Amino acid sequence: MIRRKILSLAWPAVCEMMLYMLLDFVDVAFVGRLGAQSLAAVGLGAQIYFSILFIFCALSAGATALIARAVGAKDPEKAGKTAGHALSLAVLIGIAVTVSVYLFTDVVVGLFRFEAGVRQLAAVYIKTTGSVAAFGMVLFISNGIFRGAGLTKIPFYIAALTNVVNIAGDYVLIFGKCGFPALGVRGAAIATASAQVTGCVVMVVLLISGATMVRVRPGYFFRFRDRELTGVILKLSAPAGIEEAVMNLGRLLGSFMLAGLGTVPFAAHQVILTAESLSYMPGLRFCGCCYQSCGTESRCTQT
């Protein structure tokens, strides 16, 4: 029984992770045709931006745990309020990330020992994708909300949609197809940003419409009077955020040292990292689903 439950939750989550990995493969494949400078710039820009974003996306850890508990207790109102709190925090944090990106990107990118052209392109990528940080935050937090409710197929379908948008955007905007100008690195960033906005909009519509067991009523947004709930979400999410921060700091330090070897070695390293992710990323998602399944199952049997 539990084994079937784990597998039913895990296969969409593993497929979702594979689709997000496909985004990286497509970006590397398309941008790589522009040369080592562009590939190094996108690799650096994506690493800096998503490192910042994913630290705060650890907020979904607390939301996932609380929503799994509420669903197990058959309390949809508590699940909706928790989701509303988490999404409201995601929007506020996303706005703060956008402001920080525009204020500090040039300084941070300047720390890496690349030629001016790579640093300039990396800054363009970060500022373009960072302009929709709030949408990205809401998208990733929504993924956690649906996983907490055991609805792992929804994030999988959204990942498929974002892949379509990103791949089409990359092809059209990087190389200038279908009457669009060839934007190169900026085009790759716009495609990524467009995919996140699209996925976010669909997620929010699903949550507000009540199409699933987790319904976020408009009145649940930006209502922080329940400070205890907000505090619990942040308390549960803090360890995951610290873990993510430590891991990403290590990756950024490694990139900082690799930058000293030059643009071509750094670009080659980005290609290898993308290929290497096939060996461990699906397993991480499967382990997460095992924990989620066992936790939800135990709560359900207690109610």
Image: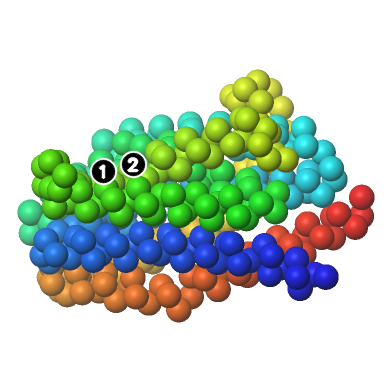
Q: Tell me the crowding category of disc 2: few under 14, some 14 to 19, or many 20 or more residues within 10 angstroms, Cα based.
A: many
Quadrant, the N terminus: bottom right
Provide residue 172's location: percent of width, then percent of height.
20, 48
Q: Tell me the crowding category of disc 1: few under 14, some 14 to 19, or many 20 or more residues within 10 angstroms, Cα based.
A: many
What is the secondary structure assignment of the residue under circle 2? helix
Q: What label sits on residue 190 in the rendered view?
A: 1
Q: Residue at the spot x=22%, y=53% of the render? A: 171
Choose top left, top right, bottom left or bottom right for residue 129.
Answer: top left
Choose top left, top right, bottom left or bottom right for residue 297.
Answer: bottom right
Asked if residue 112 shows in the view, the reply is no
Gap in Å between the C-alphas at discs 2 and 1? 6 Å
Q: Residue furthest front?
A: 178
Residue 134, above or below 303: above
Provide residue 14's location: percent of width, then percent of height.
55, 66
Q: Residue at the spot x=84%, y=60% of the render? A: 298
Along the horizontal axis of the image, is 79 left or right of 98? right
Q: Tell me whether circle 2 and circle 1 mark residues in contact (CB < 8 Å).
A: yes
Provide residue 220's location: percent of width, then percent of height.
65, 25
Q: Residue at the spot x=36%, y=59% of the render? A: 23
Along the horizontal axis of the image, is 172 left or right of 193? left
Q: What label sits on residue 194 in the rendered view?
A: 2
Asked if residue 212 shows in the view, the reply is yes
Q: Nearer the viewer, residue 298 or 237?
A: 298
Q: Residue furthest left?
A: 116
The amino acid beneath tag 2 is: Ser
Q: Residue at the spot x=76%, y=73% of the render? A: 3
